[in-house]
Image: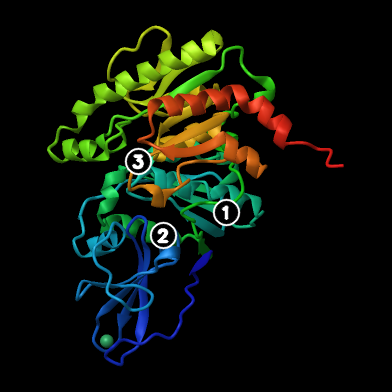
Amino acid sequence: MIQLKPYISTSCSCSCGGDLYFSEYLWQGLHVCEILVCNRCNKKRINSLPVNQSILEPYTFYPDSGVVNDAQGNIVPDNWYSKKLRSIVSPVQDDIEIEIDIIRKYDEVLILNTLDYIYGHSFLFLLNLQQIVKSGTSLGIVVIVQPMLKWLIPREDVAEIWTVNLEFKSFNNYYPDLSTKINSELVRFKKVELSKGHVIPTNENININKFTGIKPYDFLNEPAHPRITFIWREDPDRLWIRNIYLSKGFKKIGFGLLLIPFQYLRIIFIFKLLKNKLGMKYNYSVAGLGKFGRFPSFIKDGRAKYFTEEAEKMLCKVYAESALVIGVHGSGMLLPSAHAGMAISLMPSKRWANYAEDILFTEKDVRLASFQRRIVPLNMCIFDLIDIISDMISGRDYFLKKFIHSDEL
Ligand SMILES: [Zn+2]
């Protein structure tokens, strides 16, 4: 964690030879920055504090020149991360609503900032809470969150929740009013620390029940008819379409949604073949976000049209009743993989650099984890995929017999 208050100053020089002095903190969203001002030329230097992505890529921004430097002093071109820092020079002067929910009063606090422009990032930042709570810190935990994630915060573990009423895409921008309001809250405390808020929160498995209140699938207490569930999305980037050039081309000309029927037909086809193979012991279902098409009666439609707290809880129940979930790589797989017995993530071409980021593991044994959480190419032939799914479902018991044994003598 990083101490914000009292501020720890370090001697720092400007290129003009003057000294840089701390002015204030700036809360952009995923960038939490310190603004330093030169006492000679008055120029500003904005350091993105080493939390979340800045642990991996620490950037410094010079608003007068518009230059972003990396840790080695090289100029950073526009990328998804530097763009957010550069947004500081084009502030949006809206009045931002923050709801301050004080559950327990503390003089010394640790802030976990989960603000981001992408749901999956924010959700992963929030999961840092598990290790913070486990550390037994004497600091009161303050979580800064957007409305959609608020329901996931275990209130019994935190001191305050600050809900910023902005949607995810808003955090492509910088709102000075938001920054001022967060800074004005810091006045209440004697000491303020900022959590590192790691991009991938912990190397320990996440106890998802603590966040959602829903116990994950239990192989020792299986339902009579476990589900096999496809995680539905309708955004053109994450459709189950084998040819990436087709989906990219359609998206480019604004016709990405025309491919949704192909995904719909593929799901019906795969479930028909799985039903022929595995029979009616299993409930075949679709969950996730969307509404396109009506499925045949043997496929249960558990999709939500909108995300509300109630809808999200219902979806998590569907995931937790699923022996296996399958879906296209992305943040939409985080809650399903955390709750389901097993998971398959279909990895689109050109996305392999994000390997395993969308899967939350539940297994302690690495071999069982490799069996139960699989990442396969999205463009895999559907018959190979059926082979993998049916073997995972019907071969798990034998795998346990073969690989997991307590008597080593
Ligand atoms: Zn200077």
133 relative to 324 in the view: left or right: right
Q: CA distance from mark 3 to mark 2?
A: 23 Å
Residue drawn at 31 percent across, 44 percent down: 168
Q: Residue furthest top?
A: 297
Q: Which residue is mark 3?
A: 348
- In primary-sequence order, the first of circles 3 and 2 is 2
Mark 1 is on which residue type? Gly
Q: Residue furthest right?
A: 409
Quadrant containing the C terminus is top right
- In primary-sequence order, the first of circles 3 and 1 is 1
Q: Nearer the viewer, residue 129 or 401?
A: 401
Q: Residues within 10 Å of mark 3 (few under 14, many from 20)?
A: many
Which labelled disc corresponds to residue 53? 2
Q: Nearer the viewer, residue 109 or 57?
A: 57
Q: In terms of image quarters, where does ligand 1 lie?
A: bottom left
Mark 2 is on which residue type? Gln
| Image quadrant where residue 308 sits | top left
Q: Nearer the viewer, residue 94 or 375?
A: 375
User: Height in image: 400 above or below 39?
Assistant: above
